Image (cartoon, rainbow, N blue to C red):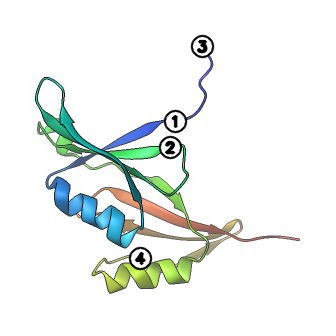
Amino acid sequence: MKAEFIDVVCLPVNDPERAKSFYTEVLGFTVVRDTRGGPLHSRWIELGPEGAKTTIALVEAQSRRSQYPVEGLVLKVSNLEQARARLVHYGCRPKEISRETWGLHLTVNDPDGNGWVLVEHEITV
């Protein structure tokens, strides 16, 4: 088997509509699919940055085990200062921007505690 790319990352959420609003309004993701189905008739909300191959799916937390948040998701942005200002505008509490040898980053949690790292890679000559 040869893997082609990561297709979907599932994130546990308690309130799918609130989470959908966060990802569309705050992070600017596009809704790929919003359906109900399967044996439990559960809701499947799939979103991603415009044109991205990899998406996220907001999955209602059905059990205590699935309620633990996901950590370390990385989102590349073109302007981290603007991204941070937008997060603050929408009431999020991102950490301060940190500088590393490869670029800038900050961390922020979605309304359900899923942890994101926003990065801006610096161009080196």
Label 3 and label 4: CA atoms lie apart by: 40 Å
Q: Which residue is mark 4?
A: 95
Q: Check whether the beta carbons of the residues at disc 4 and disc 1 lie within 8 A of each other.
A: no
What's the residue type where badge 1 is placed? Ile
Q: Is residue 12 above or below residue 74?
A: above
Closer to the chain start, of discs 3 and 2, is 3
Q: Is residue 34 left or right of residue 120?
A: left
For marks 4 and 1 on the same chain, the one whose residue lies earlier in the sequence: 1
Q: Mark 3 or mark 1, which is nearer the start of the sequence? A: 3
- Counting from the top left corner in percent of width and height, residue 12 is at 24, 46
> What residue sits right under mark 1 in the picture?
6
Q: Amino acid at mark 4?
A: Lys
Residue nearer the viewer, 29 or 99? 29
Please tell me which of labels 1 and 2 falls first in the chain: 1
Residue 43 position within the rendered picture, expressed as x and y whole percent measured from the top left: 18, 41
Q: Quadrant of residue 121?
A: bottom right
Q: Which secondary structure, mark 2?
A: loop
If the image is split into quadrants, where does the N terminus sit?
top right
Name the residue carrying label 3.
1
Image vertical order of residue 85 relative to residue 71, above or below? below
Foreground disc of the pair 2, 4: 2
Secondary structure found at label 3: loop
Quadrant assignment, res 9: top left
- Discs 3/2, front: 2
The reply, left or right, for residue 91 in relation to residue 28 is left
Sequence-wise first label, 2 or 4:
2
The answer to which of 79 and 70 lies nearer the viewer is 79
**Looking at the image, which residue is at 50% across and 43% down?**
54
Task: Give the number of the mark in front: 3 or 4.
Answer: 3
Please name whichever residue, 30 or 80, is drawn nearer the observer in this view of the structure. 30
